[in-house]
Image (cartoon, helix red, strand yellow):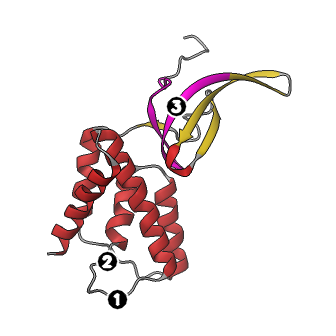
């Protein structure tokens, strides 16, 4: 058992970073920090115009993962079709749970948030914070669906919308 486990992540791979969603590894660089050489993944989140440097030895620890398999994407789509689970808890408590699910980086959990917060037009207005969480979850979901299926975000967005609309009917 060698100590230096070669990472499963390579430059040009798309990865999911829990707190930020889908990014692309642009390179792996060495940096000296406090006199210690450190190997870092340089991950670009194009949409957010943000670059993140993650120590390669910490990547899995922080929950960075490869894109979901098409199988997981279908499961997430199936989750969207499910009935929304409305909890009777106070909004602050629910909001916290939704946030945790979004930041878990787990596609199925993210799909649950989209499902639970999706509103058909004829339903009561969403609060601002509900809308924020819904949009954050929706964006994470569509970005990953797009990256997995190799289509653009607009196409992925359409696909997700169709599932949500078909559910409402």
Residue drawn at x 60%, y 32% is 42
Cα distance, mark 1 to mark 2? Answer: 8 Å
Which residue, given by chain and number where applicable, does mark 1 sit on? 124
Foreground: disc 3 or disc 2: 3
Residue 19 in sight here: no
Give the x, y percent position of residue 140.
42, 54
In terms of secondary structure, where does tag 1 sit?
A: loop
| Tag 3–tag 2 contact (CB < 8 Å) | no
Answer with left or right where residue 163 lies relative to residue 103.
Answer: left
| Tag 1–tag 3 contact (CB < 8 Å) | no
| Magenta region, residue range | 8-29
In terms of secondary structure, where does tag 3 sit?
A: strand
| Tag 1–tag 2 contact (CB < 8 Å) | yes
Circle number at residue 119: 2
Number of other residues with Cα within 10 Å of mark 3, as a class: few under 14, some 14 to 19, many 20 or more: many
Give whichever of discs 1 and 2 has the lower sequence position: 2
Residue 1 in sight here: yes
Which residue, given by chain and number where applicable, does mark 3 sit on? 25
Cα distance, mark 3 to mark 2? Answer: 35 Å
């Amino acid at each position: 058992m060698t100590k230096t486990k070669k990472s499963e992540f390579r430059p040009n791979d798309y990865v999911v970073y829990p707190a930020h969603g889908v990014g692309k590894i642009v390179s792996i660089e060495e940096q000296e920090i406090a006199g210690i050489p450190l190997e870092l993944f340089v991950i670009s989140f194009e949409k957010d115009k943000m670059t993140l440097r993650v120590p390669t030895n910490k990547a899995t620890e922080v929950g960075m993962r490869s894109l979901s398999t098409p199988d997981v994407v279908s499961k997430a789509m199936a989750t969207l079709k499910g009935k929304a689970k409305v909890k009777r808890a106070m909004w602050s408590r629910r909001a916290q749970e939704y946030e945790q699910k979004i930041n878990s980086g787990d596609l199925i959990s993210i799909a649950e948030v989209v499902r639970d917060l999706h509103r058909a037009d004829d339903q009561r207005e969403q609060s601002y914070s509900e809308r924020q969480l819904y949009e954050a979850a929706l964006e994470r979901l569509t970005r990953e669906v797009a990256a997995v299926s190799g289509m653009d975000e607009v196409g992925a967005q359409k696909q997700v919308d169709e599932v949500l609309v078909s559910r409402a009917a």
